[in-house]
Image: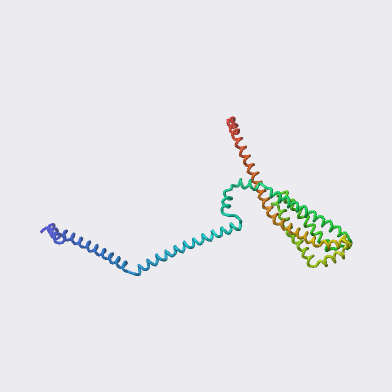
Amino acid sequence: MTNRQWFQKTTKLTYNPVKRKRDKDKTKKDSNSGTSAAAATAAHDHASSPSNLHSEIESDARQKERNELRDARRKEREERRKQFDKLQDKRDGKSSKQKKKEQKISQEERDKRDARLGCCHRFTQFLVKLIHVIDAIIGLACVIYGVFIFRFTQPAMAAVITFLTFGSLMLSTSIVGTIGFCTSICRRWGIALSAWSAACIAFFYMFVIIALLADPDTCFNYLTANQSVLFLNEASIAMIRMWLPAIYIACACLAVVETCRFFVLRKLRNTLLRYDAAQRSITERSKQQQDSNRTILTAPLLEDDQSWVV
């Protein structure tokens, strides 16, 4: 037997292709059936386990509660914001419609509106200037009287200090307030100083009324003791005592006038500051417009010059 015949015989005995194919199909079928059975059992176990279902239900309920709580907080925040806006509008004295109208107004229209001073403003300004003139006259009279009674060898120092201090305050604040009305230097600080000095003057008038009502005899005893250096006599002191109720009324009226001057001057200063700002912006805008017009007019001339140069 040759080697070739022996090799063919051994391969026929050991290698059987039909049998090998049958074995492969059987192993593939077993593996597929095993994987499908495992998946089915796992799905059955997952579906049949009550703990997983309960956990899913709980997670869904928690998520729903969180969403509801978040929506409730958002609504509450919006309501608080609306209430705060309403309170702020009431405090400012402006409604939402007025705010929208103010937002729609342009800067030019606002400047034009602020640059106009109405009749009421001019009348108020005239009254305030008149009060400044009256205060200046009263202050000048008090200063002159204080200087005259200070010339004596033994002057009544309490009266001298009172008249000089009060007169200097009235006179200086009137001058500063007039400067604040006439010029816009330092944001019209003279008007603010005059307003706060008006509060001090009103307090002084009230102090005089309270002192005279509490103990008038002390005041008249002081006048009687120092009548020679105060340019007074018995008749003038008796007249002052007789006119004491009129003095109370005059001091009260002056206190009310000074209090009104305090509030009016503060408002008037804000109006004048807006007026000054509007005037500045209008002048700057007009200058810019003039410059732009000049550039527009000179541009073609420059082009012609360049063409001639070429």
What sort of colour scheme is used for the picture?
A: rainbow
Please tell me which residue is depicted at 24% across the width and 63% down the height of the picture.
Answer: 33
State the residue at coordinates (38%, 66%): 57
The residue furthest left is 1
In the rendered view, does 103 fall on the left or right side of 154? left
Q: Quadrant of the C terminus?
A: top right
Vertical arrangement, residue 305 with respect to residue 70, above or below: above
Residue 198, x across and y down, in percent: 74, 57
Q: Quadrant of the N terminus?
A: bottom left
**Visible residue check, residue 219:** yes
Closest to the observer: 143 or 17?
143
- Whether residue 201 is visible: no
Residue 201, image quadrant: bottom right
- Asked if residue 98 is positioned above or below residue 19 in the image, the reply reads above
Task: Answer with the quarter of the image where residue 152 lies.
Answer: bottom right
Q: Is residue 272 above or below residue 287?
A: below
For this view, does 209 lie left or right of residue 226? left
For image coordinates 59% across by 58% down, the residue present is: 90
Q: Position of residue 69 (x, y in %)?
A: 46, 64
Image label count: 0
Q: In x, y percent, where is residue 175?
A: 76, 52
In the depicted view, which residue is nearer to us: 215 or 194? 215
Please provide percent x and percent y for residue 161: 82, 61
| Residue 137 placement, left or right of 46 | right
85 and 276: which is toward the camera: 85
